[in-house]
Amino acid sequence: MTQSEFLKLVMPFKDKVFRLAKRLLVSREEAEDATQEVLLKLWRNKSQIENYKNVEAFSMTMTKNFCLDKLKSKQSQNLKIVHSNYQDHNVALQKQIELNDSLQWVAKIIEDLPEQQKMVVQLRDIEQYDFDEIAKMLGMNPTAVRVALSRARKFIREKLTNTHNYGIK
């Protein structure tokens, strides 16, 4: 078997071998090493490859066995068996309660705003309208909308800071 014949046979499934190794070993570097090792073993035994019905399935079995051996070996203690692509999207209960509490405080503070500022905050920060759209809706100048929003945000920020820092209601 020539090198080009070997490459033609192996190249279509080498990425699958890598993905399996990455799934088992987690570490990208270890998966690359495992893939290289499996392909090297296939190359060394290229004279016997024709005896196998499905070379891809054979190489996947080799990859699985190599990775499991790697994990069992003493070198596995050096491997990090943590998914690098795992992220915990669940917010801790305490954090969730604090966020809900803060949202309730902001809602109460917004209720204390003058009517015009309350509407501007609602339309801009909650409904996500542009300044020009808000100005048309409320019959205001766009600059006046910006000023009202700035004052409302400042008021909310000050009240929320006082509440969090000093417990002042």
Image (cartoon, rainbow, N blue to C red):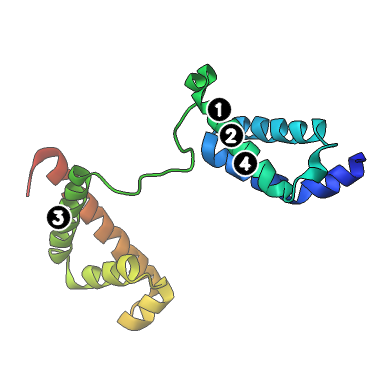
Separation of residues labelled 3 and 1 (CA atoms): 57 Å
Separation of residues labelled 2 and 4 (CA atoms): 6 Å
Q: Which residue is mark 4?
A: 61
Contact flag, marks 2 and 3 (Cβ < 8 Å): no
Apparent side of residue 64 relative to residue 7 in the rendered image (left or right): left
Amino acid type assigned to the residue bearing label 4 in the image: Thr
Q: Which mark is residue 65?
A: 2
x, y percentage for residue 42? 77, 36
Foreground pick, 38 / 137:
38
Apparent side of residue 79 relative to residue 62 in the rendered image (left or right): left
Q: Is residue 145 above or below residue 88?
A: below
Amino acid type assigned to the residue bearing label 3 in the image: Trp
Q: Earlier in the sequence, mark 4 or mark 1?
A: 4
Q: Residue furthest top?
A: 74
Local SS, label 2: helix
Contact flag, marks 2 and 1 (Cβ < 8 Å): yes
Amino acid type assigned to the residue bearing label 1 in the image: Asp
Q: Is residue 9 visible?
A: yes
- Give the residue drawn at x 33%, y 82%: 137
Q: Which residue is mark 3?
A: 105
Q: Is residue 26 visible?
A: no
Foreground pick, 77 / 47:
47
**Which of the two marks, 2 or 3, is nearer to us in this view?**
2
Quadrant in the picture for residue 63: top right
Local SS, label 1: helix
x, y percentage for residue 81? 46, 31
